[in-house]
Amino acid sequence: MRQAGRYMAEYRALRERHSLLDLCRTPDLATEVTLQPIRRIEVDAAILFSDLLLPLEPMGVRFDFVKGEGPTIENPLRSEADLARIRRFEPRDALSPVLQAIRQIKGELAGRVPLIGFTGAPFTLASYAIEGGHSANFAHTKALMYGSPAAWHRFCDLLADMAADYLVAQIEAGVDAVQLFDSWVGSLNAHDYREFILPHTRKIFERLEAYDVPTIHFGVGTGAILEQLRDAGGDVIGADWRIPIDEAWARIGPDRAIQGNLDPTVLLAPIQRILAATDDVLARAEGRPGHIFNLGHGILPMTPLEQVQALARYVHQQTRI
Amino acid sequence: MRQAGRYMAEYRALRERHSLLDLCRTPDLATEVTLQPIRRIEVDAAILFSDLLLPLEPMGVRFDFVKGEGPTIENPLRSEADLARIRRFEPRDALSPVLQAIRQIKGELAGRVPLIGFTGAPFTLASYAIEGGHSANFAHTKALMYGSPAAWHRFCDLLADMAADYLVAQIEAGVDAVQLFDSWVGSLNAHDYREFILPHTRKIFERLEAYDVPTIHFGVGTGAILEQLRDAGGDVIGADWRIPIDEAWARIGPDRAIQGNLDPTVLLAPIQRILAATDDVLARAEGRPGHIFNLGHGILPMTPLEQVQALARYVHQQTRI
């Protein structure tokens, strides 16, 4: 999950002078913001500071972030003709500032911790492009998916190619691991996931097999489709807090690693409750290799930094061999 | 789920002249809107037209519906002192227009179909009052829950008393069944549900045991806490589309009925897909007694009425004994 954010004073200070997109598109700024949490919190990896929507613009989908409302897309895709207008882009040209940031971050990190790159998976990226922003029910997305399955599959196949192109470019620029965010795919049931999503997401992970980097496959509220996410691919499967991590892992199987699964709102609680909830996650993962302790979703803006710092310290204390 | 709504032309016509709250608070209008879907769709029950938030106002929480944005609460509850200010109200006084509407609807229905009343469960009602509207992460709600557990429990105990008072008043006014909506409780895991919610929701269902009406317990995205919802109570447990209804029923157990579970976005699909998805739900429920065919959440405004009509007709054809 994005580590930098409004819960950090140094991030808020930068955001007073620069828009979110400026931070993402300016290598010096993206480097600085990526490193902010590394300086303050005992995390085991840096996460590239970027935004899921960045690839939309070179596809021809213009968007902006409206203060307090999240992303807004000017011309959301609503028809087969809209989907057919989308063109594949070359990330080395269109997203070169991101790749430049990766090279700078790798230099600054000098091997202290690895760097994780990421992009959005087909369903999640499609849902932003089609809904025009956040959505409660993904009605327009599913209407196109159910109503125009051939156009949907062509569109998602293209999104999969572009996601793989972009992750490969990030790997070649130096990231040590990649994460595929299918944040909103938990709105589908297993049947629809298998029909409309799995082949496309699998294609991305198959492209990545040629590279020697770990892959992470993440979603929220995916308790009903964990087996399907696993079948689509990923060395590590992300799980949110709704399902106990031992149950999730049993369903995913012992041959995959797991990432999770503290509820980020627990970081708003008194420290004793944070530590007790952390103990529960660690006990359920039983110290098995292949558990990456993490939050089940991003850090909330109102989170006190000291609580995040205390959590990271505590996890290290409890898991030191 | 609310049956009437913007997908019906006659509802949209009324809404041009009246606000949502006017419809809820004017017995003649609430009666008319409740009956609109009964006239057009082969449903087996009428659902009282009302709004989950209506009980907030007599508690001292003022709100309004802002066009296109859903509910907005003027003074959201954010502290223990805010929670302590809430006072129990008498629904026979404060919500008498709703009870008057129930009597009128019962008269108009003349026994053709039963009438289902409803109210919001403690977590869902608390989340609106605390967040100030819809929420993606329930951060303020959970911060109060984790940070001020004693105040949280006092507040939810009071919300449970008021929910039970209101449902009892609806039963005495004539409804034939009652539904408790805990729409957003699927954001909690089983551990937190048991600690923070279950005792309060159970109290509501225990109060209702003295009355000879079926009770329905509904939530969305509750795949990880179906057993906990069952333990809290309800003759019928609602399940959304994320989990196959046979799996949900196996976990809930054979001694409860089940309601669900077609994805409402499927109603935006071509008719053949609607019927195939319906066949799947019906086959999984195997014609067992105790299955109430329903959508997993409310009908979307962009749904074509003819699709809803065709679905209701089809379910009756397929399940006629």
Image (cartoon, coloured by chain):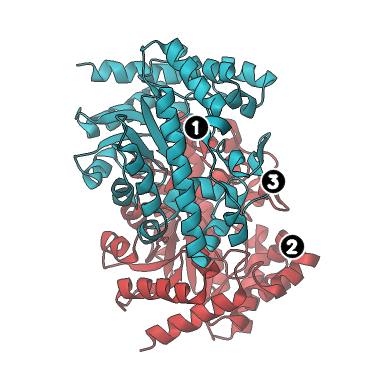
Chain colours: A red, B cyan
Residue at 65% over, 71% down: A101
Chain of the residue under the numbered disc 2 shown in the image:
A
Quadrant housing the C terminus of chain B: top left
Q: Which residue lies under the disc numbered 1? A: A143
Dot 1 surroundings within 10 Å: few (below 14), some, or many (20 or more)? many
Residue at 58% over, 55% down: B83
Determine whether A270 is above or below B207 in the image. Answer: below
Both labels 1 and 3 in a single chain: no
Residue B219 lies, in percent from the top left, at: 41, 42
Does dot 2 land on a helix, a strand or a loop? helix
State the residue in front, B241 or B220: B220
Residue sticking out furthest to the bottom: A321
Residue A22's disc number: 2
Residue B74's disc number: 3
Residue A206 lies, in percent from the top left, at: 39, 58
Chain of the residue under the numbered disc 1 shown in the image:
A
Both labels 1 and 2 in a single chain: yes
Residue B149 lies, in percent from the top left, at: 48, 64
Q: From where the camera sits, is residue A157 visible?
A: no
Residue at 49% over, 46% down: B124
**Residues under numbered marks 1 and 3 in contact, where contact means CB atoms less than 8 Å apart:** no
Residue at 42% over, 12% down: B109
B150 displayed left or right of B293: right
Q: Amino acid at mark 3?
A: Glu
